[in-house]
Image (tube, rainbow, N blue to C red):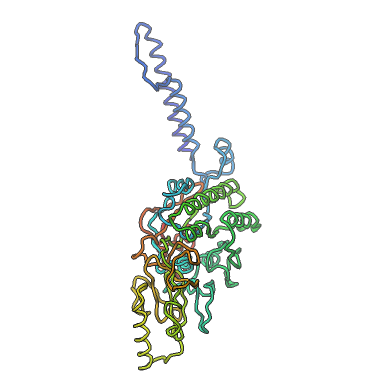
Amino acid sequence: MFKSLATSLSSLFVVILFAFTMLMVFAGSEGVQFQRVAFEGDQQTAVLIAEQARKLKQEAEIVNNTDLGPGDLAAVGEEMEDGPSGGGETVVLWISIPGFRTDYIEKSEAPFLDDMLREGTGTDDMTPNFPCLTSPAHATLATGATVAGHGIPLDKIREEDGTVVDADGPHLKAEPIWTTATRQGVRTLVHDWPLSYTQPSEHAAAIHNSSYNPDLSDQERLDALYAAWEGDADENKLRLLMCRLDDIGKAGLVNGPRADETYEAVKATDAVLKAFIDKVKENWEKLAKPNAELAVLITTDHGLAELEKNINLAKLLGPELMKNADAVAHDAIAHLYFKGVAESGGERQLFEDNFDGELSKRIYFRTFKPGDMPESWNYTSEGRIGHRVLVLKSGYGFTDAEAEEPVFDPAEGPGFYGGYGYPIEESSRMKGQCIIWGFPNQPNASGGGKIDQTGFHATVAKLLGIEPAETASSTPAF
């Protein structure tokens, strides 16, 4: 530090000595006259010397705080601007914005998100793994594994006894980041992240919601997050905070992804997010340890496509087929589980041939047997994949709502105009936006290209300085 300071002061002395010498030269040249034509923007010599001196003094003050003793730090602190300097441990704020299409920032008035992208980094080519559904995608983000690893094929799970329940933490077959972090001593808060509501007592997040309230606005969710963060009295500060903001996704579903109301929702979320981050920055010294860095990670589960038609699967297939099959169907994916038929043999084969023949008469979807799906989907999970998997064409969505016909317009019910779940290779609208941004310094991250969802678990682990779970991809997204 002192060597750097001495060098800067020496440079300052040389500049002043040069100026003094020039003045002496001109003073001793009374018989010589110089005349110069002034140019626009010219500054006086004294002003230039003062400016150079100010810059050199500023350089002398920019030193690495880790090299300072208590006395040195206090002395330099008096000359430096107020505010956190960073250089300490990283606190990660991970925000999921479902249905965050790649074109939303460009087509909406979102100055804060624009600033985050400009100051930090990100990509509009975040590629979801199959299927592009809420719970499977959030499971991939949190665990760093595909369905084959984390075991969540749909938003709902069919239990062994045939009951259908919402997917939650106990259904996970891979370790989520909130467990990974807690297990390694990082205190964690999780609000509204799918699959986080029911957690095992061992290595449970320090703070987490026990249920999801769909009626809360983004403002209310951020207010609740901040209140929990600020109210945490533990000396071991929270270092991983995760939440979900739903207003953009809801607007896209209800109004359609390209509706003015959806773009207004992006604008509104941009504003409340800025206010939240501003409040965090203002109170950073209370929320985190001295010199802590904040890394904000914004991701999405998937994008959103235009929904043209709804399909009631039970009505489409009819009671004769459905008497031997249970269906779990929503958005672009359906699983059919056979029941009341022989497990094997000729009778079973005859049943399957007839069933497949009837399915082939319906033109809206492709039908897969568990072993016939594309290998790149990694869509396997013992006991949870149906005997037949139906994947709809882009623009169609399964629903439990009923109308006069089995295939009907969104206006007839349930009133959604956005669809998702389609394979990324068939609908580029499933791609999403992601951003990484920091305070007071930007994270050491590169972006701008194609990013796979399996890399975010490892990214957060890297930022926190911990090891990713054994079940996770070890390659960070950033």
Q: Residue furthest bottom?
A: 346
Q: Is residue 342 left or right of residue 83?
A: left
Q: Nearer the viewer, residue 324 or 425?
A: 324
Q: Nearer the viewer, residue 308 or 28?
A: 308
Q: Name the spot of residue 279 as percent of width and height, x first.
A: 59, 48
Image quarter for residue 406? bottom left
Q: Name the spot of residue 460 as percent of width and height, x first.
A: 47, 60
In the picture, the quarter occupied by the C terminus is: bottom left
Image quarter for residue 375? bottom left
Question: Would residue 172 be seen by someone viewing this image from the given angle?
Answer: yes
Q: Is residue 407 above or below residue 163?
A: above
Image quarter for residue 169? bottom right
Q: Is residue 447 left or right of residue 178?
A: left
Q: Name the spot of residue 196 as percent of width and height, x first.
A: 55, 67
Q: Is residue 3 above or below residue 344?
A: above
Q: Nearer the viewer, residue 398 or 201?
A: 398
Q: Is residue 15 above or below residue 402?
A: above
Q: Name the spot of residue 204 as percent of width and height, x first.
A: 58, 68
- Residue found 58% across the figure and 73% down from its top: 200
Q: Is residue 424 left or right of residue 94?
A: left
Q: Residue furthest top?
A: 31
Question: Would residue 467 be seen by someone viewing this image from the given angle?
Answer: no
